Image: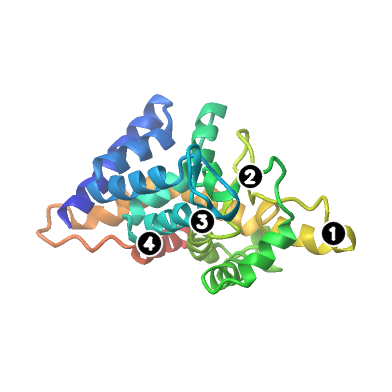
Amino acid sequence: MACCLASVFLLLQLLGSASSTGGNRCVAAAEACTADAQCQQLRSEYVARCLGRAAPGDWSGPGVCVRSRCRRALRRFFARGPPALTHALLFCGCESPACAERRRQTFAPACAFAGPGPAPPSCLKARDRCERSRLCRPRLLAFQASCAPAPGSRDSCPEERGPRCLLAYAGLIGTAVTPNYLDNVSARVTPWCSCGDSGNRLEECEAFHKLFTRNPCLDGAMTAFNILWPSILQDWMNPYQNTGHRFPQVSSMSILTALALHVLL
């Protein structure tokens, strides 16, 4: 408990410092993770597992990695790491190409999403592999349900849906449809796939691709998270300061519920 709370306070301090000095929030989030033993251990694990590029058949050798182990380590990071730190790393905002490239490589190293060839696979093939997987299929369904635009609401997405959307998005990392930031000049994301060879299924393929690249729910949730994250944590903890009360356990559900309430107020 004390370790986790200390890491949260450090994150707030680093993010506040980065904001006030025009610094890099992604670097600040990375430093906060490094200062937390659990976060750093899990992060070191996936970095070590994901070095190199995957080869066909998960063959292991010099310069290559075992993709299944890399993806498992990525999933463990989000399942077991302090959510205050893992989500700050994942959704940190960038204002420079260098920051964006660092963020882009953080959770989707080449081993996790790039194949042995230079061209990305068909999005339909990636989706089909996910739908055949007992691990990936429920995560994709959760993402589709939680991040689906709704007619009649502002920007076609109810604000209260944002926290669920972000949780579902994070759940896809380390699966057959691991998403990643698309480039170094925006916050757009997509799985590593294309629709160039879709033939008469082009419309179907593009519909899947647009779940990530043109999704107002996902875009709005990521923007709100980046804007509100430091103040939400501060507001969430302030009522307990100097009162002698115990701090609540930091969890993804409690933090993201606080985010939803903050958005609605």
In percent of width and height, residue 201 lies at 85, 63
Q: Residue at x 54, y 48 (%)?
A: 223
Q: Is residue 149 visible?
A: no
Quarter of the view holding residue 256: bottom left
Q: Residue at x 38, y 31 (%)?
A: 18
Give the residue at mark 4: 79
State the SS at label 4: helix
Give the residue at mark 3: 173
Circle 1: residue type? Leu
State the SS at label 2: loop
Side of 87 where 206 appears, left or right: right
Farthest residue, direction right = 200
Q: Residues within 10 Å of mark 2 (few under 14, many from 20)?
A: few
Q: Which badge, 3 or 4, is on the more N-terminal residue? A: 4
Q: CA distance from mark 3 to mark 2?
A: 19 Å
Circle 2: residue type? Pro
Residue 152 is marked as none
